[in-house]
Image (tube, rainbow, N blue to C red):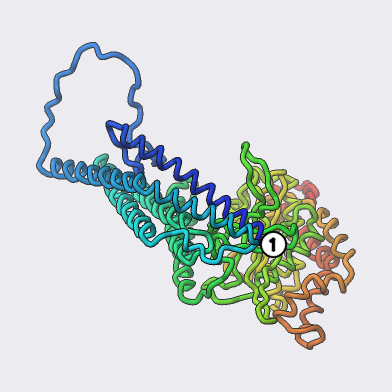
Amino acid sequence: MPEPEELMRKEHQRQQINRWREQLIERVDNAQRVQEQTRFTPAYQYTRRMETPLAQGIPTDGAIVQQAPPAQIHESRRARKKREEREKAMDLARLQELKVQQMEADLTEDREDMALSAYYGQAAADLIGEPVSRPERFLTEDHLKKEQALLKERLTAIDLSETAALKELESQGKVSERASRELRWRAQQDRASAMGDYARLLPIGSALRQKAMLAKEAQEIKADKLRRLYKVLADETMSQEERARDEATIERHAKYDALKAIFRSDNPLAHEDATWTNPITGGTLINVGRAFFGGTKPMYIFEDRSQPMERDGKTVYKQYLFKEAVNCIGKYKPEGALVTEAAAALQQRICGEYAIPAFAAVQTIDGKERILGSFQERIELGEGLDLFSWQVNPTETEGLTDQLKSEILREHTLDWLLCNFDTKGENFLHRTDGHLSSFDKEASFSYLKKEGADTMSYSFQPHANNTLYNALFSAYAQGNIDLDLSAVQVQIDRANAIPDDAYLEMFDRMLTQKYGQKGSKKRNEIEELILSRKNNLAAEYERFFGALRQERQRNLETRVPNSGAAPEAAPS
């Protein structure tokens, strides 16, 4: 009997065949519409999708009382030349799009034959209980050349439409950098989409499909950079300082991407259609594409087909985010994935239902283990205060509710135990149930032996960026916000309830990878430091909070006018 993973792969192939059929029907309908239209409108009219319409306030009703005489407008030679260039560019774009749609119509029958061949080939393989050995055979050499020619023409159509759209924008006046960036981003999105459509038409499991998916991903990376650059300009609430910082970050990440192209080794899970068994549910996880949520490490979205859900009348699946076990320039770094797994185990004990499940993906070949990366459950996002922006201006209190502050304190306990000093505002997410969770713990335990790491303060900052906790405690000490410091007692009690042996066991795989087997001098030293943070947690909070209250009292007293009356007691 086939293994569950193989059954899920076959189901994935059947779903692909169904998608082929749907695409065929849609393309046939499109081809018929093209033939019926008397006036053709290009598909790639980027300017019609721009956020700022090119024409506003045009009346849509009313009758003409008297025909106006034709306007006598003098057109300069330069203006006429510009107009003619614009009209020529739009004509070229229209003709190229017509050519593309005609080619797609001509390919309908070939695609149907390929889909039927794949369907019957898979059915025959199912009968004998064996996987399809050569999925490439579903695609003839002649058909492949036609699909590649179509892709080339589609990309040309996008280039021509981008040029025509830019000339149309220029006719309205000087083109702003914001409009230019949006136009380039949307055109690049279409290039990535075109290459994705081509890749997904190729047989699942074929080398051709895998190569095409990698090319599609490269286009997606370019589109994401353009999207982020556009977003920086489009956000009118950003200060110049924030805008400069974000643009510098985008350029730095682009340099990391260039280095990853040199140093990054192939990862079997970093391909669309790749599968992995979920150790939590036992279901099969399937890679459905690259994820772009910031950060420097490649991430992918996996769906667990054993966890279907209904959303807006459609069946969707529980998703997980896979992060490769590499550093920012693509070199192999297994520690991060194992730290993520260990941190998730501790988060479950400390934060309970607000923990984010995670596990490492470990591949064993010829008795040797290779850490491929980490999986983390993707949490549905709700509404809440933008903690990234708040950290920049921690004097703003609107939206900083008592519940939110208490939950930040809860996560502080977790990060203190993990010796993680890299939790910024963007490392928190608001859940749909109104509560908070923190993520990205790969920097945990990096500074266990660093001077100052064993003493709570709001000034210790080993990374270039400050932490949200430092901003929170500093604002409290300055008297700008109130905090219920007793909220951490729940987490202190939970940590104290974990026996030392069980506590260290949560970090065993990570400790073995970084410091060797149990009993070594180096590992014993690290284990003592980890246990010390847990066993001294209550005492360290008492010392730190006592110093915070005293500093807060002094700062509040300096704000009271010298009237001879005693100042009011500062709230806790």
Residue for point 64% across, 53% down: 319
Count of numbered marks:
1
Residue for point 11% across, 33% down: 74
Does 348 sit left or right of 321 as displayed? Answer: right
Residue for point 36% across, 39% down: 31
Instruction: Determine the secondary structure under disc 1.
Output: loop
In the image, farthest residue toward the bottom: 521
Q: Position of residue 117 (x, y in %)?
A: 49, 54
Q: Mark 1 packing: few (<14 Cα in 10 Å), some, or many (20+)?
A: few
Foreground of the two, 76 or 374:
374
Q: Position of residue 527 (x, y in %)?
A: 80, 78
Residue 455: name its quadrant: bottom right
Q: Position of residue 47 (x, y in %)?
A: 34, 41
Quadrant where the N terminus is found in the figure: bottom right
User: Is residue 314 visible to us here?
Assistant: yes
Label 1 is placed on what type of residue?
A: Pro
Foreground of the two, 297 or 368:
368
Foreground of the two, 546 or 355:
355
Does 220 sit left or right of 70 as displayed? Answer: right
Does 444 sit left or right of 208 as displayed? Answer: right
Residue 554: name its quadrant: bottom right
User: Is residue 552 visible to us here?
Assistant: no
Does 98 sit left or right of 375 as displayed? Answer: left
Q: Position of residue 268 (x, y in %)?
A: 57, 69
- Is 528 above or below relative to 320? below
In the image, farthest residue toward the top: 65
Foreground of the two, 236 or 202:
202
Which residue lies under the disc numbered 1? 2
Residue 365: name its quadrant: bottom right
